Image (spheres, rainbow, N blue to C red):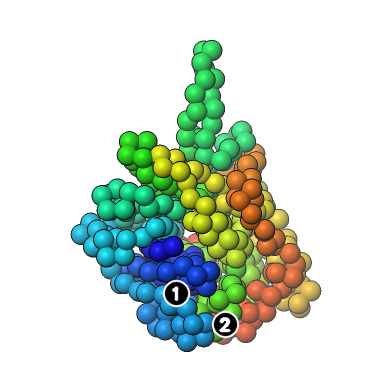
């Protein structure tokens, strides 16, 4: 296939580009470096320095023989999006191109406006470019499990059958996002569903849980190909952040009671899920939704797992509860259905002690890059 990856410089976008190219697809990645600019502006740069996107592509071609084409372009500009799609004529568009940080989206008015405009404009432009130029193209959109919130009933895969006063119908599962970033993802889903049912587009929306990991088969070919491994409060997902804290000797920062439960997955499984979705496209007029996770943990369970493995590696890991900077339930019911991607062939990489130990070893090798003042929460929206 001709695969266009929007947001191809990101933590997920770049490994996806390498994975798709290694699988034999023709890959074009586009990015405007928004995440890099925000990370620099907020002193939230990754643990390992990453070359430019073009340089990454050159390194990957040299070590693998696979080509990835690169465009540095702002896809919130409609003309830029239309030109990109018209020039490449993709069979599949994988859409990662959004400001991905919940804390950044809650930092202040300017950050909120930037998040809202970028995320919705890119999605809207993508929809229209596909609709007008390549209407048979399959859009694979990265959503988030955070769209659902923490309801007191089981979370279905995107859709809920409702019986009311003797009649039944199926609706998008009710959603209650906990940040502006997650709210833009809810609006993405609503936009996609409108254009799917109105114009017959084909879309897969992947409701992904927090991702952890630093290693993929392609990234392991050369250390310069590693993903953007963040450990800060803006971009660092909780498992990645805890592992860095363990190495740095900073107590693991459990927000509040630590009973917040979420569904997690390894970076390698994100690549599996996205490729399975792209290679098995939705039908015309179908909004297909998968819940993209492999395991469910509370924050306390993650902290205990990291401590146990870290202590065996003589890191003497401490755990500390701190005031929760977020407005969220700290104890709640959480039971998401996630069978769709398994049915397509997903073979999970689970969070074993060995997986955590390998990540800790990689972080230890780069421990002198850790800036501990990037770890504690710098944004609060708990009121």
Instruction: Mark yes or no: residue 256 visible.
Output: no
The tag on residue 225 is none
How crowded pointer 1 is (Cα within 10 Å; few <14, some 14-19, many 20+) is rated as many
Which mark's residue is nearer the viewer, 1 or 2? 2
Looking at the rendered image, the quarter that the N terminus falls into is bottom left
Q: Residue furthest bottom?
A: 62
Q: Residue 293's spot in the image, x, y percent?
A: 61, 52
- Residue denoted by label 1: 45
Q: Is residue 8 left or right of residue 250?
A: left
Residue 322, image quadrant: bottom right
Q: Residue at x 31, y 65 (%)?
A: 88
Question: What x and y, as percent, mark residue 329?
Answer: 57, 43
1 or 2: tag closer to the N-terminus: 1
Is residue 348 or residue 315 the one in the foreground?
A: 348
Q: Residue at x 47, y 87 (%)?
A: 62
Give how far across and how far down residue 185 sits, in percent: 42, 48
Q: Is residue 160 above or below residue 339?
A: above
Crowdedness near tag 2: few (<14), some (14–19) or many (≥20) residues, C-alpha within 10 Å = some
Could you tell me which residue is drawn at 49 percent across and 56 percent down? Answer: 278
On screen, residue 372 versus residue 53, left or right, reads right
Q: Secondary structure at mark 1?
A: loop
In this view, the residue in front, 53 or 63, is: 63
Residue at mark 1 to residue at mark 2: CA–CA distance: 23 Å
Q: Is disc 2 placed on a helix, strand or loop? A: helix
User: Considering only vertical position in the picture, is 382 above or below 230?
Assistant: above
Residue 221: which numbered mark, if any?
2
Total marks placed: 2
Residue at the image position 62 percent from the left and 42 percent from the top: 336
Question: From the viewer's perspective, is residue 326 above or below residue 37?
Answer: above
């Amino acid at each position: 296939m001709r695969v266009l990856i929007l947001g191809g410089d990101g933590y997920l976008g770049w490994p996806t580009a390498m994975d798709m190219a290694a699988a034999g697809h023709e890959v074009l990645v586009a990015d405007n470096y928004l995440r890099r600019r925000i990370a620099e502006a907020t002193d939230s740069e990754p643990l390992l320095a990453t070359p430019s996107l073009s340089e990454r592509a050159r390194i990957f071609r040299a070590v693998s023989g696979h080509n990835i084409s690169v465009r540095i372009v702002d896809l919130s500009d409609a003309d830029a999006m239309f030109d990109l799609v018209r020039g490449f004529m993709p069979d599949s568009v994988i859409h990662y191109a959004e400001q991905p940080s919940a804390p950044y989206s809650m930092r202040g008015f300017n950050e909120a406006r930037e998040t809202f405009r970028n995320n919705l404009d890119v999605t809207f432009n993508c929809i229209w470019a596909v609709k007008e130029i390549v209407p048979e193209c399959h859009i694979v959109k990265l959503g988030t499990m955070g769209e659902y919130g923490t309801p007191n009933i089981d979370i279905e895969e995107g859709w809920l059958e409702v019986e009311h006063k003797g009649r039944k119908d199926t609706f998008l599962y009710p959603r209650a996002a906990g940040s502006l970033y997650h709210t833009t993802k809810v609006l993405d889903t609503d936009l996609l569903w409108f254009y799917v049912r109105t114009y017959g587009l084909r879309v897969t929306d992947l409701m992904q849980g927090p991702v952890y990991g630093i290693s993929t088969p392609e990234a392991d070919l050369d250390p310069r190909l590693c993903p953007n491994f963040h450990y800060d409060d803006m971009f660092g997902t909780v498992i990645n952040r805890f592992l860095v804290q363990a190495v740095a000797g900073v107590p693991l920062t459990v927000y509040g009671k630590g009973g917040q439960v979420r569904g997690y997955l390894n970076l390698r499984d994100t690549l599996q899920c996205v490729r399975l979705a792209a290679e098995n496209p939705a039908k015309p007029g179908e909004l297909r939704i998968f819940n993209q996770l492999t395991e469910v943990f509370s924050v306390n369970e993650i902290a205990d797992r990291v401590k146990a493995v870290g202590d065996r590696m003589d890191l003497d890991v401490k755990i500390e509860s701190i005031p929760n900077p977020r407005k969220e339930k700290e104890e709640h019911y959480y039971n998401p259905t996630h069978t769709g991607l398994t049915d397509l062939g997903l073979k999970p990489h689970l969070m074993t002690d060995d997986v955590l130990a390998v990540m800790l070893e990689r972080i230890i090798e780069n421990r002198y890059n850790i800036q501990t003042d990037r770890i504690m929460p710098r944004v609060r929206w708990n009121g």
